[in-house]
Amino acid sequence: MEFLLYLTPIGNQIINSLSLAKYSIRENTEVCRSEKDVFGYLERSKNEFVICTSNIKKGGWSLKHYVNETVYHEAVHVAQDCKNRGIRSIFGNSTLGISKKSMPLSSDKLNEVNQSATIFSFGSRDREHEAYFLEDKPKKVLHYVQKYCF
C-alpha cells in the first residue's frame, strides 16, 4: 500500500492499532474512484478503513500532509465506532463526547464538515465535527483509538 510510505511515526502507530482492532486497511477502493473529492472513509459495516491516495495525487495535494491528516481523521471515526460498539444510534450520531464548545473550527473546516456529512449520510455533523477538530492532533487520535478500541 503506497500510502504507508508517507506516514509519520504516529501515523504508523495509528494504522497498527487499527489493524490490531480488526479493521481492514485498504487503499483506492471503488468509492475512491466514484467520489473524486474523497480522501478517505470508514466502511462501518465491513470494518474497512480506506485511504484514497489516488484522489490526493490527482488533486495535486501534498501526499505527506493529506495522507496523514486523512489517517488521523478516519481514525477518529474508528474510535467513535469502538466507543459506541453495541449501543450505536440508528442514525450514527455516536461521538467521543467532546464538548462542541471546546472544538472551535474555522469557517473552511465547518464547510468541510457539512460537505462530508452530506456525502456520507451515515456521518452526523457532530461525528464529522470531532474528526475535523482532531485531524491535526495525532497524539489525541491515537489516545482515543487505544482508549476505546482495546
Image (cartoon, rainbow, N blue to C red):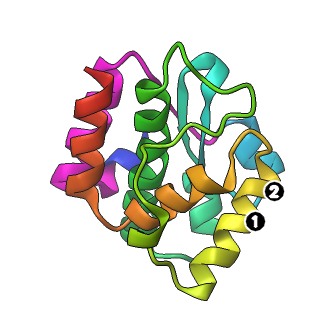
Question: Marks 1 and 2: in contact by CB < 8 Å?
Answer: yes
Q: Name the residue under label 1.
A: 115
Q: Which residue is at a point 44% across and 22% down the rendered structure image?
A: 23
Q: Residue at x 73, y 66 (%)?
A: 114
Using residue 115 as the reference point, say whether residue 100 is left or right of it: left
Give the side of residue 38 with respect to residue 48, left or right. right
| Residue in front for this viewpoint, 84 or 54 | 84
Q: What element carries label 1?
A: helix
Q: Within 10 angstroms of label 2, few (less than 14), some, or many (20 or more) residues?
A: few
**Disc assigned to residue 123:** none
Q: Position of residue 14 (x, y in %)?
A: 27, 41
Instruction: Give how far apart the Cα atoms at labels 2 and 1 are.
Output: 5 Å
**Does 100 appear above or below 86?**
below
Residue 2 position (above or below residue 55): above
Magenta residues, start to end: 5-28
At label 1, counting other C-alpha atoms closer than 10 Å, the crowd grade (few under 14, some 14-19, many 20 or more) is few
Tell me which residue sits at (49%, 18%) in the image: 85
Do we see residue 109 in this rendering? yes
Q: Nearer the viewer, residue 150 or 34?
A: 150
Residue 110 in percent (x, y) is at 63, 76
Q: Is residue 7 magenta?
A: yes
